[in-house]
């Protein structure tokens, strides 16, 4: 095994100079600021700007993180889709408190979100499922997400079985075990890298139907 010397790791360093985050120049609503930042990532050609790290906690209290894709921002909630029998979904059904993390290194920005996840309606999930590429729809039927499988060949065999099952069917139905979650935020923190590690951190917290904001030490 090739080891990377710790000295080499500790010397990795970058100065952040792309922008700032000042309370007086940002919206009172964090969703508006999120939308602004998300829009700005398009001009930077950032790869997969809707990729976010979702962290859940199991019934044993063990955290687990993975990347998922943001597929909607509905009434201030962050929507993603998954297999409801997956580990992440089973965690959420036991403990709905989750966190989301957007990391846009090229923009020197990070957004941390803490909130509560709930299932969206079957109708909303079906509407999105109908827009997915056919291969993705078949994959939702073929994959028992998070469950062990003997080999790649076995997975591809199951996929081909689904191709045959739905051959000639124009509109593939959504599996009962598949659908979306909406994360309603309770806290949203925006991070902008600054020189000398004196980064800007502004945290919004939900208070009833409104938001408060405060600056945090970097």
Image (tube, grey):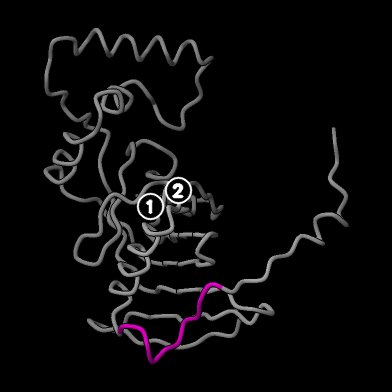
Q: Position of residue 41 (x, y in %)?
A: 40, 60
Q: Is residue 146 left or right of residue 205?
A: right
In the rendered view, tell whether residue 33 sits above or below residue 10: below
* Mark 1 crowd level (few <14, some 14–19, many ≥20, 10 Å Cα): some
Query: How far apart, in angstroms, are the residues tagged by discs 2 and 1?
Result: 9 Å
Which residue is nearer to you in this view: 150 or 215?
Answer: 215
In the rendered view, tell whether residue 190 sits above or below residue 163: below
Kind of element beneath mark 1: loop
Kind of element beneath mark 2: loop
Q: Residue at x 61, y 71 (%)?
A: 16
Q: Is residue 87 left or right of residue 141?
A: right
Q: Which residues are magenta?
A: 18-27
Q: Position of residue 32 (x, y in %)?
A: 28, 74
Q: Which residue is mark 2?
A: 47
Q: Residue at x 26, y 27 (%)?
A: 137
Q: Which residue is mark 1?
A: 50
- The stretch drawn in magenta includes residue 106: no
Q: Residue at x 38, y 24 (%)?
A: 143
- The stretch drawn in magenta includes residue 23: yes
Which residue is nearer to you in this view: 9 or 146?
Answer: 9
Q: Position of residue 165 (x, y in %)?
A: 22, 10
């Amino acid at each position: 095994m090739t080891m990377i010397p710790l000295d080499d790791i500790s010397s990795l360093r970058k100065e952040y100079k792309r922008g700032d985050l000042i309370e007086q120049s940002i919206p009172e609503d964090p969703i508006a600021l999120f939308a602004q930042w998300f829009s700005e990532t398009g001009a930077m050609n950032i790869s997969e700007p809707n990729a976010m790290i979702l962290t859940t906690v199991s019934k044993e209290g063990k955290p687990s993180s993975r990347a998922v894709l943001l597929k909607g921002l509905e009434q201030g909630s962050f929507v993603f889709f998954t297999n409801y029998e997956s580990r992440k979904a089973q965690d959420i059904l036991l403990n709905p408190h989750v966190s989301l993390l957007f990391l846009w290194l090229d923009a020197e920005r990070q957004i941390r979100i803490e909130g509560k996840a709930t299932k969206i309606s079957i109708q909303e999930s079906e509407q999105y499922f109908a827009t997915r590429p056919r291969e993705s729809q078949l994959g939702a039927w073929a994959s028992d997400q998070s469950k062990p499988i003997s080999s790649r060949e076995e997975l591809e065999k199951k996929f081909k079985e689904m191709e045959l099952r739905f051959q000639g069917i124009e509109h593939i139905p959504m599996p009962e075990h598949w659908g979306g979650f909406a994360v309603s935020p309770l806290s949203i923190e925006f991070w902008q890298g600054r020189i000398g590690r004196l980064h800007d951190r502004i945290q919004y917290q939900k208070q009833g139907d409104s938001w408060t904001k405060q600056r945090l030490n970097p």
